[in-house]
Each structure stands twice: as structure tokens, then as C-alpha cells.
Image (spheres, rainbow, N blue to C red):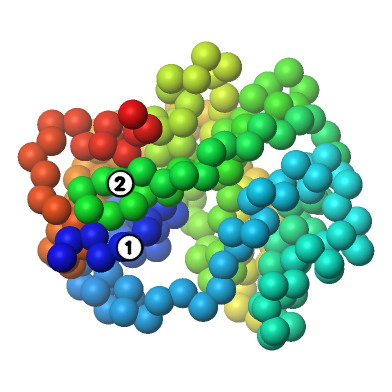
């Protein structure tokens, strides 16, 4: 049955895309999806997102971090989550205000699609729509960041009267074994991939999901609109 309760988010496009997120091949990407979806996840960073307000505000003390972010029996999993929190606290630095984005996913062609941003950060008179990559092993390359920025703009910024700018925060590990590194990318839509490139990537990914038995087929003219909250 298409969907099978699977959840996806914008970060999954570059994760599964083959050979690349711009210039994606649906058949090859489907093969990648089938191979890698069978394994399933082994840890989640979801407990961070409802607690971003004290992190952004600078109130997340070391005691708060170790107490609030220790859901697993394995220390290495807890340490990984806590490292993300510390890096986010470092970036926001107790500045501005945080407005949480609703986390409820949208049903799209038989699967669930999570919101692409965690919230909007108001600082120094500017609003930023914030996407956070907490996945340690999914490093974001320049093309990925430009893709994500276009997606954040189209799905979360274009209809917002506050005109937020996409902010991609990457706390992955660029060199295996050397720890996470904070990289923040302010990406106005002018620096993102083109709308045509994004549209084609979405079409290819939806086709790949269909071929992998995850999504229903579609003949929608505007595929990007499928992912927007109605």
C-alpha cells in the first residue's frame, strides 16, 4: 500500500537523491530509497524542537541540557542530542525571539510530509525561517543548502507577510570522527536554486517515491503546492 506510514521532510530530498538533488534521476533515487528505508531510524532529535525557546533565549544551562536531553539508555545517543543543543545555543546566543512553527505533518499522496522549518527567529529587526539539520551523518554541501533555501522560501516564506529569510543551520559532522561543527547559512532566495530546478527536483522525488511504493502517482500541474498547508 502506498505510503505505508512513511514520514519525509525536505532534508530527505538531498539525503536520498541520486546522483544529486539538482539533476535527480527518479529511477536511481527509487533504488536508493528502497535500499535505505528498510533499515529504519535508531534515534530521534524531535525532543529538541519543543524546547527551542529556552535554547534560543540563552536559558539552557548545562544542568538543563543534561537533564532534559537524556531520553536514551545509551550515553552516546544522549551525548549526540546534547551536542546539538549546545551548538544551537551557541548560534542563537540569547538574542531575539523565537516563534515555534506547528509540527503537524501534511498528508501528501499517501505519505506524511513534515514542516521544513522549526520556527521563525526574530533578531535585529529581521525574521528568519529556520531549518535545522541535526543529523550527524548528513553533511550539507553548497548545492544542498541552495536547494533547502528554495524549499523553505516556497513552503514557508513566500506567503508570510513578515518576509522571513531562509536560515539553514547545519550541525552535522563534516569529517567523520572529528565531531559536529556549527555552520549557519543565511540564504535569501536570490542565492537559492531556481524555481524551475526546485520544481523538477520535487517531481523527480515524487516519481521516485512512487516507484519505491511509498507514494501514489500524481498528474498535478503544480507539485510544489501539494506540500503546502491547506
Mark before the other along the chain sequence, 1 or 2: 1
Left or right of 54: which side holds 47?
A: left
Dot 2, crowdedness within 10 Å: few (<14), some or many (≥20)? some
Q: Position of residue 34 (x, y in %)?
A: 24, 74
Dot 1, crowdedness within 10 Å: few (<14), some or many (≥20)? few
Q: What secondary structure is marked by label 2? A: strand
- Identified at 57% across, 24% down, the residue is 164
Left or right of 102: which side holds 66?
A: right
Q: Is residue 78 visible?
A: yes
Q: Are marks 1 and 2 in contact (CB under 8 Å)?
A: no
Q: Position of residue 68 (x, y in %)?
A: 79, 63
Number of the label disc, if any, that sits on residue 107:
2
Quadrant assignment for the C terminus: top left
Quadrant assignment for the N terminus: bottom left
- Identified at 52% across, 29% down, the residue is 188
Q: What secondary structure is marked by label 1? A: loop
Residue at the far top: name it. Answer: 161
Residue at the far bottom: name it. Answer: 74
Splitting the image into 4 quarters, where does residue 5 fall? bottom left
Vertical placement of residue 86 versus 118, above or below: below
Splitting the image into 4 quarters, where does residue 30 fall? bottom left
Identify residue for label 1. Answer: 6
Real-space CA distance between mark 1 and mark 2, rounded to the nearest whole angstrom: 10 Å
Vertical placement of residue 115 versus 38, above or below: above
Q: Is residue 93 visible?
A: no
- Identified at 50% across, 20% down, the residue is 160
Nearer to the camera, 222 or 3: 3
Left or right of 160: which side holds 221?
A: left
Nearer to the camera, 101 or 195: 101
Nearer to the camera, 1 or 48: 1
Q: How many marks?
A: 2
Amino acid at each position: 500500500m502506498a505510503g505505508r506510514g512513511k514520514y519525509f521532510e525536505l532534508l530527505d530530498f538531498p539525503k536520498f537523491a541520486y546522483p544529486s538533488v539538482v539533476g535527480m534521476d527518479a529511477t536511481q533515487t527509487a533504488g536508493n530509497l528502497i535500499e535505505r528505508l528498510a533499515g529504519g531510524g535508531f534515534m530521534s532529535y524531535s525532543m529538541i524542537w519543543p524546547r527551542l525557546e529556552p535554547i534560543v533565549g540563552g536559558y539552557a544551562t548545562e544542568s538543563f541540557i543534561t537533564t532534559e536531553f537524556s531520553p536514551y539508555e545509551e550515553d552516546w545517543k544522549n551525548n549526540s542530542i546534547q551536542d546539538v543543543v549546545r551548538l544551537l545555543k551557541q548560534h542563537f546566543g540569547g538574542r531575539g525571539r523565537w516563534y515555534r512553527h506547528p509540527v503537524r505533518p501534511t498528508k501528501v499522496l499517501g505519505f506524511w510530509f513534515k514542516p521544513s522549518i522549526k520556527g521563525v527567529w526574530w533578531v535585529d529587526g529581521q525574521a528568519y525561517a529556520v531549518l535545522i539539520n541535526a543529523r550527524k551523518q548528513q553533511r550539507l554541501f553548497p548545492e544542498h543548502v541552495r536547494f533547502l533555501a528554495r524549499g523553505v522560501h516556497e513552503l514557508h516564506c513566500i506567503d508570510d507577510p513578515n518576509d522571513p529569510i531562509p536560515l539553514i543551520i547545519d550541525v552535522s559532522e563534516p569529517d567523520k570522527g572529528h565531531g559536529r561543527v556549527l555552520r549557519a547559512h543565511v540564504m535569501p532566495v536570490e542565492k537559492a536554486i531556481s524555481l524551475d530546478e526546485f520544481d523538477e527536483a520535487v517531481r523527480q522525488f515524487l516519481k521516485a517515491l512512487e516507484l519505491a511504493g511509498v507514494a501514489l502517482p500524481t498528474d498535478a500541474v503544480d507539485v510544489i503546492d501539494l506540500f503546502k498547508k491547506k
